[in-house]
Amino acid sequence: MLNFVALKPIVYIAVFLILSATSVRSQSNDSLPFRMFKSDVILATDLGFYSAPFSLKDNYNLGVNRIKFKNNPKLVLGLGFAYKWFSFRLGFALPVDLRSTKKFEETNYFDVGLRFSIKQTYSTLEFRNYQGFTIKNASHWNDSLDSPNQFRAKTSSINVSANVYYFKSKSFNFKAAMGKAGHYTGSAQTWYFKSSLNFFGVINEAGSLVPVELTDSSDRTNASSVGALDMGFIPGYAYANRINNWQFAIFGGLGGVIQSKYYTYLGTTRSFLGIAPRLDFRLIVGYSRPRYFLILSGDFDIKSAQIQDLTYNQTYYNVRLTSGFRIKTKASKEN
């Protein structure tokens, strides 16, 4: 099992991060470059996919220094509703694999999250668990395989995270940048500050993460799990604009985290302290008019941990196309 004992501090720190986001003072939107449709009923549907490839880099046998693990993404259909302060989105994984099942078989997904925006902040709580990864080009060291890749049904990935964005300028509103509950009427730019708490890791319940052909006598290369608990701060810059009903927003940041990282071999866990860089990137592009919208969005969560000569890298990302309508109500007509 992954080192779930390390998850206990997440509960306390995540509550602190989320509660701190609610302390921002209210602002007047009269002179701000965006319009919010607070009194409209918003109906939306989206189609996209989630992915979480990872790699392990070390001095393995047979001259191999990097092993790449890929999941098989499924199409995900989402249905959303929003009115005033209340909103929700329900997602369903469709029986459509984006990669060939002959080469990558199937990955099982569990993904749940809470996201909300209050004034100049945007907060997220997320839990992700993907099971079933394929080692790419495993036939290079194992000529008994029937295909170029090797499927690992018992290899899984977990990620638990809490994040709070604080946008310095009052002219920047995350909901308006998303293009559903509002949209921009001009341009806005701001520095932002992201606080982040994460637990992430990978495990092979059937044995070593690394194929036996590549392992040696060291505990590290024979490890059944690798992961980290980290906390850090990422400064970044965000820009949003809307021109002739076409809107786009881009977020980019670079910072660092303090990590408690570990690997487990035969039930024994070795932990290490260190620091690691962290990149934040998000892109939103779409078309928005007062009564309807069409938005393409993508965000990338790049994580890494280094233990001696072992480097573990994983990228959680999703791409989603969202369309919907804003329906006037009696309250919106009176405003």
Image (tube, rainbow, N blue to C red):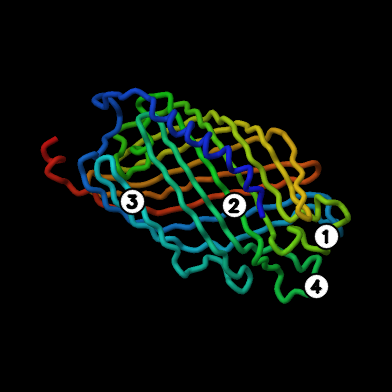
Q: Is residue 310 left or right of residue 51?
A: right
Nearer the observer, disc 1 or disc 4?
1
Within 10 Å of disc 4 (Cα), the crowding (few <14, some 14-19, many 20+) is: few
Please name the amino acid that badge 4 sits on.
Asp
Q: Residue at x 75, y 50 (%)?
A: 264
Q: Which residue is mark 4?
A: 143
Q: Residue at x 27, y 27 (%)?
A: 29
Q: Nearer the viewer, residue 33 or 38?
A: 38
Residue 294: give its label.
3
Distance CA(mark 3)–CA(mark 1): 48 Å
Within 10 Å of disc 2 (Cα), the crowding (few <14, some 14-19, many 20+) is: some
Q: How many marks?
A: 4
Q: Earlier in the sequence, mark 3 or mark 1?
A: 1
Please name the amino acid that badge 1 sits on.
Leu
Query: In terms of secondary structure, where does tag 3 sit?
Result: strand
Q: Position of residue 175 (x, y in %)?
A: 35, 38
Q: Quadrant of the C terminus?
A: top left
Q: Which residue is mark 2?
A: 158
Q: Earlier in the sequence, mark 2 or mark 3?
A: 2
- Tag 3–tag 1 contact (CB < 8 Å): no
